[in-house]
Amino acid sequence: MAIRQKSQVTVRMRGTASSHSHVEVAVRDLTAEIDEPVERGGTNRGFSPTETAYAALIGCTNTIGHKCAEALGVDIGQLGFEMEVDFDRRGVLLQQEVAVPFTAIRLQVTADGPASAEELDRVAAETAKYCAISKLFEGAGTKLDIRWRRN
């Protein structure tokens, strides 16, 4: 018998800060470190908060992309990612409030499987419908340009 997953859940996380820039975050039985680079007063023991947000888009695109490909019966193989983010840093520098700090994100997704360009377009379209992190960025006003191609 298949387990029916809940459609609405509450996620609980904990964080413990050891300095002004370093925090250890726990969820489930896992921990991650978020920190700033040394040149910004951190200890460089983890991604910065903004880098963590960008990385989440890559992770979500990978996971949802593979789920969509499987549902469509498309073999995308393994995915590779190249990302560029246009980041208006005036807000984090406390110079000015910025409504859309991440003005644009360009993400190139490369599939090494046998899927055709048309099949990848279908997977990309389905992934765009369901990736929670891309929805988060779009809802915040970020211009997303996510392109899929064969390796």
Image (spheres, rainbow, N blue to C red):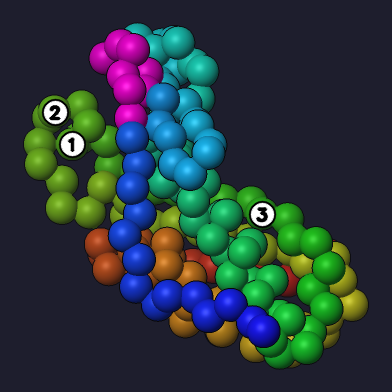
Q: Earlier in the sequence, mark 3 or mark 1?
A: 3
Q: Mark 1: which secondary structure? A: loop
Asked if residue 19 is among those painted magenta in the image, a careful observer would answer yes
> At which x and y percent is residue 91?
18, 36
Q: Residue furthest front?
A: 1
Does the image show residue 133?
A: yes
Per the rendered image, the range of residues in magenta is 15-23
Give the number of the disc on residue 94. Answer: 2
Name the residue: 33% across, 35% down.
Answer: 14
* Labelled pair 2, 1 in contact (Cβ < 8 Å): yes
> At which x and y percent is residue 125?
56, 84
> Which residue type carries mark 2?
Leu
Name the residue: 49% across, 16% down.
Answer: 44
Q: Mark 3: which secondary structure? A: strand
**Where does label 3 land, which residue?**
81
Label 2 – label 1 distance at C-alpha: 5 Å
Asked if residue 11 is among those painted magenta in the image, a careful observer would answer no
Q: Nearer the viewer, residue 99 or 52?
A: 52
> Which residue type carries mark 1?
Gly
Give the number of the disc on residue 49. Answer: none
Q: Earlier in the sequence, mark 2 or mark 3?
A: 3
**Where does label 1 land, which residue?**
91
> At which x and y percent is residue 143?
36, 65
Q: Nearer the viewer, residue 134 or 27?
A: 27
Q: Quadrant of residue 140?
A: bottom left
Total of numbered circles in the picture? 3
> At which x and y percent is residue 128?
50, 77
